[in-house]
Image (tube, rainbow, N blue to C red):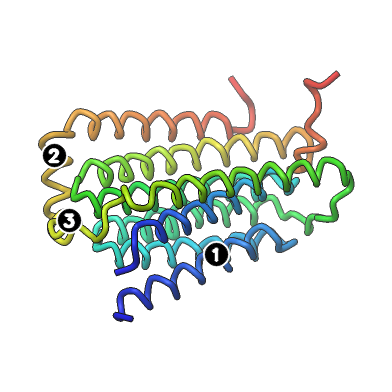
Amino acid sequence: MPLSEIAFYVFSAGAIVCALLTITRKSAVVSALMLVLTFCFLAAIYLTLQAQFLAVVQVAVYAGAIMVLVLFVIMLLNLESEDIRVTNNWKAIVGILAALGVLAQILAMIFLSQDKLPKSINPAAAVLGTTESVGRALYTGYSFPFEMASLILISAAVGAIILAKKKLV
Amino acid sequence: MAPLSHYLAVSAILFVIGTVGVLFRRNAIIIFMCVELMLNAVNLTLIAFAQFLGDQTGQILVFFVMTVAAAEAAVGLAIIIALFRNKQTVDVTKMNILKW
């Protein structure tokens, strides 16, 4: 088995274990830190796909910016640990069944269409994942949505400040 | 190189873990983090398809998903702070003011 394949399975196992820890830990801080680890493992999986630019953005934006914001809010609210015992058994069974149903459905779809999927990574992929080529696409063909993204960000920033202000106007 | 179906399977598993978290947790911040996990699972699918098909559009879409996720994080956390200021809790089962 080549090294890139071993790396993929190791990182996938890490991501899945950390994701499971995220949803099972009582303390919100531990959950958040596990989620940071999950995002780092996902960035490593992006690297095995030769998407270097998005791997770096994943670490910077998700593991960096977003999760630091979440940790700040947890710290500000000073929450006690949540009691995660399930109180309503019937609801829990329905929830688990729905989740397993979705998983079975997606996996069945993947399995049934397996021979229609591309067999190996496209030879062009190594070039497509670089900062240069993603940047070129963003500033040429996708320049309008790129500018619109700045509008989304500024409106979100203004909205967040107004929502979190002491007195709503 | 691992086959595409394995990437898709990992993504599906992460997505379902996120779904279970949203369904079972009561802390609004953890529910919010589970939504982020689901977004990331979908990003993995998009990047895997983009690289296996040799089409860059998938990567561009992931870039915009990340932008919107950052905006969503800011607004979502502001809403959680506003909720906490009103009810002194982030337990979603206690936020039933619109319920009969």
- Mark 1 — residue? A16
- Residue A139's label in the rendered image is 2
- Dot 1: within a 10 Å radius of its alpha carbon, few (fewer than 14), some, or many (20 or more) residues? some
* Residue under the image location 47 percent in, 45 percent down: A109
Q: Earlier in the sequence, mark 2 or mark 1?
A: 1
Give the Cα distance between marks 2 and 3: 12 Å
For the residue labelled by badge 3, is the local secondary structure a helix, a strand or a loop?
A: helix
Chain of the residue on which disc 2 is drawn? A
Quadrant where the image shows the N terminus of chain B: bottom left
Tag nearer the camera, 1 or 3: 1
User: Which amino acid type corresponds to the residue marked 1 in the rendered image?
Assistant: Ile
Q: Earlier in the sequence, mark 1 or mark 3?
A: 1
In three-dimensional space, the C-alpha distance between marks 1 and 3, rounded to whole angstroms, equals 28 Å
Q: Say if labels 2 and 1 share a chain.
A: yes
Q: How many marks?
A: 3
Q: Residue at x 46, y 61 (%)?
A: A39
Query: Looking at numbered disc 3 in the image, what kind of residue is underneath it?
Result: Thr
- Which amino acid, by three-letter code, is at mark 2? Tyr
Rate crowding at label 2 as few (under 14), some (14 to 19) or many (20 or more) other CA atoms within 10 Å. Answer: few
* C-alpha span from label 2 to label 1: 35 Å
Helix, strand or loop for disc 1:
helix
**Helix, strand or loop for disc 2:** helix
Asked if A21 appears above or below B49 in the picture, the reply is below
Q: Which is closer to the viewer, label 2 or label 1?
A: 1
Above or below, A40 relative to B30: below
Quadrant housing residue A130: bottom left
- Determine which of the numbered discs, if any, sits on residue A106 in the image: none
